[in-house]
Image (cartoon, grey):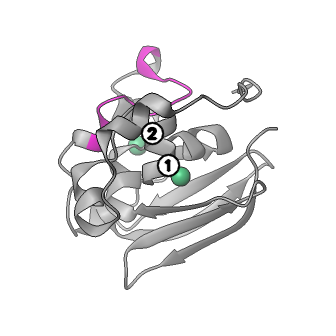
């Protein structure tokens, strides 16, 4: 099954962007994480660095707290495959396709699937996950490859 959102919302006071998916999953992204993971060529450091998934170290990177670069100004649907996120500093090059967004979900369950622990800032606010559980994890059937 390919990833497709059934709902998208942004809470500016909590600085959280929420996506609900067609498989029932809910992803909550802090604005700072979205900006840090901006998939545009200039944020990625050139077209050759553009990948279909966020950088592996995205969850361990320091997240910029609150300034115009991490204040979400608008969300624009881009075709039926992506969202363009517009930031208060005017940056609007980031086209987040569904596959990329889902790969960026910081929840413990998704991090476990990717064999990476949830980020520390997430663990502090969220549920504690024990490392041993990772061993019991069986990867889900490979999701259909991203076409983007
Ligand atoms: Zn960017
Ligand atoms: Zn998730």
Give the residue at mark 2.
112
Residue at 52% across, 36% down: 113
Give the residue at mark 1.
109
Give SS at disc 1: helix
The quarter of the picture where residue 96 lies is: top right
Crowdedness of circle 1 by 10 Å Cα count: few (<14), some, many (20+)? some
Give SS at disc 2: helix
Magenta-highlighted residues:
48-59
User: CA–CA distance between discs 1 and 2?
Assistant: 5 Å
Q: Pointer 1 and pointer 2: residues touching (CB < 8 Å)?
A: yes
- Magenta region, main secondary structure: loop
For the C terminus, the image quarter is top right
Q: Is residue 145 above or below residue 3?
A: above
132 within the magenta span = no
Q: Is mark 1 within 8 Å of ligand 2?
A: yes
Lateral position of residue 111 relative to residue 142, left or right: left
Q: Is residue 39 above or below residue 55?
A: below
Residue at 31% across, 39% down: 131
The quarter of the picture where residue 16 lies is: bottom left
Q: Residue 83, percent across and down?
A: 64, 53
Residue at 31% across, 59% down: 32
The quarter of the picture where residue 124 lies is: bottom left
């Amino acid at each position: 099954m390919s990833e497709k959102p059934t709902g998208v919302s942004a809470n500016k006071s909590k600085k959280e962007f929420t996506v609900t998916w067609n498989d029932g999953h809910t992803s909550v992204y802090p604005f700072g994480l979205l900006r840090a993971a901006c998939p545009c060529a200039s944020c990625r450091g050139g077209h050759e660095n553009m990948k279909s998934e966020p950088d592996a170290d995205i969850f361990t990177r320091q997240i910029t707290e609150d300034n115009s670069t991490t204040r979400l100004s608008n969300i624009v649907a881009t075709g039926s495959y992506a969202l363009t996120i517009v930031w208060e500093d005017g940056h609007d090059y980031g086209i987040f396709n569904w596959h990329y967004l889902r790969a960026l979900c910081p929840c413990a369950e998704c991090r476990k699937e990717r064999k990476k622990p949830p980020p520390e800032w997430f663990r502090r606010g969220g549920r504690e996950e024990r490392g041993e559980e990772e061993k019991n994890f069986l990867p889900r059937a490979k999701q259909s490859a991203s076409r983007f």
